[in-house]
Image (tube, helix red, strand yellow):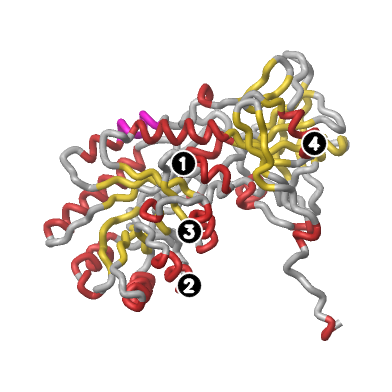
């Protein structure tokens, strides 16, 4: 859940701690920049959601696209979580951490035949199907492998929540899902797919949604759809309502796990359908930070800049859609001290390389550390080697100990797949 009192980090005196570990100590041993995750915060958020929906059969599949670090995944799987995957690579990671394949759901609008084959061989629970052609392809592959595979048809409920248009996925203008009339026809013609069991329906209306109304509207449309399929002689076993629950980045007031459950669960009264949730950001977003070091201070006649060693290749969200991340000094100055309005930027040669703009911060100088908050979701997973920058490490904290879960890349790692083609140079 997103409440601030669930976060296992904050200042102790003047120094910023993650659980019982001073962030400055991690920086001294690991170097900067680096991602830092609180394992216990991930688990707290997962258990809050599991408890809130415990009154009905519910499978919680953590959305790996938010954070696919193996240590984090293994921690969640050990507590009973399933996994929501969107690629063959994520399937490989899911198998690596030993998740029960019957707790894997496979989304994505562009699943390839090799990905479908491997998922069926791995005996996953189901595919979330996005198009008629994809349904036909999964049917053909399942027939060739002599199995009957469960699938869920993704509906596009035409619900547009109040969030950034890049992360809205449930309106008619988006590439995701099928219209309700088309989906109904598929259920009524399920005989066309003898190697598939059309066992569920799936929706995902977007990300960073902070109010229950659009969820309730979309879920009600799904339940009405289930009723219409039932009247037509079909049976739907699963309703996957996706993820998208919002978190606190700045001044948002998102719903808690309990508030979300109170809004949704009454809709399921006297219904035998099994519920699947696919939370990602809700579990991981406020469970991690990005730590960077100030390289230079720069002042012009019109602007002040703080140049740090983290860049858009490490955290793309601010450049990608002007996402807000709170910036905190790792060593806090006395309360009420002077603050300066500045841009926090990185070393990459792009005007879009910034972590924050026009941000009022206390005096910071070369060598000081900053914590970029709410980076547990869509942080490292979206990082790149742009400007030939090695990707930074991922460090996990538990109690008073920390461990490098993914080491910093070297230039040898970056160049490991390349060669100079001597025949052309």
> Alpha carbon of mark 4 to alpha carbon of mark 2: how far?
43 Å
Q: Nearer the viewer, mark 4 or mark 2?
A: 2
Circle 4 Cα neighbour tier, 10 Å, few/some/many (<14 / 14–19 / ≥20): many
Residue 173 visible in the snapshot = no
Main SS class of the magenta portion in the image: helix
User: Percent position (x, y) of residue 144?
Assistant: 35, 78
> Alpha carbon of mark 2 to alpha carbon of mark 1: how far?
28 Å
- Please report contact status of discs 1 and 4: CB closer than 8 Å, yes or no: no
Image vertical order of residue 291 relative to residue 122, above or below: above
Which residue lies at the image location 35% right of the left edge and 52% below the top edge? 203
Circle 1 Cα neighbour tier, 10 Å, few/some/many (<14 / 14–19 / ≥20): few
Q: Nearer the viewer, mark 1 or mark 3?
A: 1
Give the mark nearest the N terminus, 2 or 1: 1
User: Percent position (x, y) of residue 384?
Assistant: 69, 55
Q: Label 3, on which residue?
A: 86
Image vertical order of residue 416 relative to residue 272, above or below: below
> Alpha carbon of mark 4 to alpha carbon of mark 3: how far?
34 Å
Quarter holding the C terminus?
A: bottom right
Q: Quadrant of residue 236?
A: bottom left
Q: Is residue 386 found inside the magenta-colored segment of the image?
A: no
- Highlighted magenta segment, given as a residue range: 257-263
> Alpha carbon of mark 1 to alpha carbon of mark 4: how far?
35 Å
Circle 2 Cα neighbour tier, 10 Å, few/some/many (<14 / 14–19 / ≥20): few
Q: Label 1, on which residue?
A: 78
- Which of 359 and 87 lies nearest the eye of the viewer? 87
Which residue lies at the image location 18% right of the left edge and 43% below the top edge? 271
Left or right, 174 with respect to 191, comes to: right
Q: Label 2, on which residue?
A: 114
Secondary element at image label 2:
helix
Give the mark nearest the N terminus, 4 or 3: 3
Q: Label 4, on which residue?
A: 293
Secondary element at image label 1:
helix
């Amino acid at each position: 859940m997103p409440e601030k009192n669930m976060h296992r980090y904050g200042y102790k005196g003047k120094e910023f701690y993650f659980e019982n570990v001073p962030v400055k100590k991690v920086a001294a041993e690991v170097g900067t920049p680096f991602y830092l995750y609180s394992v216990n915060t991930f688990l707290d958020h997962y258990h809050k959601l599991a408890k809130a929906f415990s009154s009905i059969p519910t499978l919680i599949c953590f959305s790996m696209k938010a954070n696919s670090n193996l240590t984090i995944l293994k921690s969640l799987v050990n507590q009973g979580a399933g996994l929501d995957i969107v690629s063959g690579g994520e399937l490989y990671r899911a198998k690596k951490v030993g998740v029960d394949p019957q707790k894997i759901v496979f989304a994505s609008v562009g699943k390839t035949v090799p990905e479908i084959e491997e998922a069926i061989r791995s005996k996953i629970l189901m595919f979330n199907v996005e198009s008629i052609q994809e349904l036909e392809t999964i049917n053909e592959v399942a027939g060739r492998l002599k199995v009957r595979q469960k699938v869920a048809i993704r509906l596009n409920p035409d619900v547009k929540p109040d969030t950034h248009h890049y992360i809205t996925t449930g309106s008619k203008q988006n590439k995701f899902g099928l219209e309700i009339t088309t989906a109904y026809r598929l259920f009524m013609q399920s005989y066309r797919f003898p190697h598939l069991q059309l066992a569920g329906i799936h929706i995902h209306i977007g990300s960073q949604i902070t109010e229950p109304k659009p969820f309730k509207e979309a879920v009600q449309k799904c339940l009405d759809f289930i009723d219409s399929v039932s009247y037509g002689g079909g049976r739907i076993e699963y309703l996957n309502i996706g993820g998208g629950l919002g978190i606190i980045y700045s001044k948002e007031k998102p719903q808690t796990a309990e508030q979300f459950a109170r809004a949704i669960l009454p809709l399921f009264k006297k219904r035998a359908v099994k519920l699947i949730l696919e939370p990602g950001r809700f579990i991981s977003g406020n469970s991690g930070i990005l730590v960077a070091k100030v390289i230079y201070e720069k002042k012009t006649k019109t602007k002040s800049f703080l140049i740090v060693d983290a860049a858009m290749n490490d955290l793309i969200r601010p450049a990608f859609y002007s996402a807000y991340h709170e910036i905190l000094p790792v060593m806090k100055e006395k309360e009420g001290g002077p603050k300066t309005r500045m841009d926090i930027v990185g070393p990459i040669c792009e005007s879009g390389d910034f972590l924050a703009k026009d941000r009022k911060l206390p005096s910071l100088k070369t060598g000081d550390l900053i914590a970029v908050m709410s980076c547990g979701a869509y942080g490292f997973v979206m990082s790149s080697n742009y400007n030939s920058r090695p990707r930074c490490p991922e460090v996990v904290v538990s109690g008073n100990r920390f461990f490098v879960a993914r080491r910093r890349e070297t230039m040898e790692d970056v160049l490991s797949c390349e060669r100079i083609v001597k025949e052309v140079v």
